[in-house]
Image (cartoon, rainbow, N blue to C red):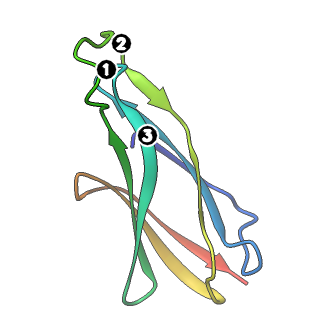
């Protein structure tokens, strides 16, 4: 993850929507999903998870980039701390209040 955008219109009915810019070392990489873990104290850890298909042995040497949307649903009203992680290391943190 190298950039984060959080939808300011997030609310209880629709959840928290966000988008990140994700990169991989070459074009064999592929984004699969976000790993979202809700911690005590309304802290939410978010990591991007990707893979390299085993079938390809030669990969185009260009940076893989994508900007997948993400959503955290089924939240109650309150303030949440979103922590976006790269390999378990904090990249970006933001507080989001939803009503």
Mark 2 and mark 3: span between their CA atoms? 15 Å
List the residue tagged with mark 2. Answer: 62
Q: Which mark is residue 43?
A: none
Helix, strand or loop at mark 3: strand
**Proximity of marks 3 and 1: CB atoms separated by less than 8 Å:** no
- Indicate the position of residue 76 as horizontal and vertical percent values: 64, 89
- Which of these two is toward me, 58 or 24? 58
Helix, strand or loop at mark 2: loop
Q: Which mark is residue 26?
A: 1
Q: Is 47 rendered above or below residue 28? A: below
Report the residue at 35% width, 29% height from top. Answer: 29
Q: Split into 4 quadrants, where in the image is the C terminus?
A: bottom right
Q: Is 20 rendered above or below residue 90? A: above
Precedes in sequence: disc 2 or disc 3: 3
Report the residue at 33% width, 9% height from top. Answer: 60
Decide if residue 93 is on the left or right side of residue 25.
right
**Proximity of marks 2 and 3: CB atoms separated by less than 8 Å:** no
Q: Residues within 10 Å of mark 3 (few under 14, many from 20)?
A: some
Helix, strand or loop at mark 1: loop
Mark 2 and mark 1: span between their CA atoms? 5 Å
- Indicate the position of residue 20 as horizontal and vertical percent values: 51, 45
Report the residue at 73% width, 75% height from top. Answer: 11
Q: Quadrant of residue 85?
A: bottom left
Q: Is 53 rendered above or below residue 15? A: above
**Proximity of marks 2 and 1: CB atoms separated by less than 8 Å:** yes
Mark 3 and mark 1: span between their CA atoms? 12 Å
List the residue tagged with mark 3. Answer: 31
- Indicate the position of residue 7 as horizontal and vertical percent values: 68, 58
- Which of these two is toward me, 93 or 74? 74
Q: Split into 4 quadrants, where in the image is the N terminus?
A: top left
Precedes in sequence: disc 3 or disc 1: 1
């Amino acid at each position: 993850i190298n950039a984060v955008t959080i939808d300011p219109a997030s609310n209880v009915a629709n959840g928290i929507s966000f988008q990140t810019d994700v990169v991989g070392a070459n074009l064999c990489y592929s984004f699969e999903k976000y790993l979202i873990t809700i911690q005590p104290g309304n802290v939410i850890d978010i990591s991007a998870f990707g893979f390299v298909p085993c079938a390809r042995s030669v990969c185009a040497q260009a940076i893989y980039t994508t900007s997948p949307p993400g959503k955290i649903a089924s939240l109650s009203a309150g303030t949440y701390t979103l922590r976006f992680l790269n390999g378990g290391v904090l990249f970006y943190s933001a507080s989001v209040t939803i009503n």
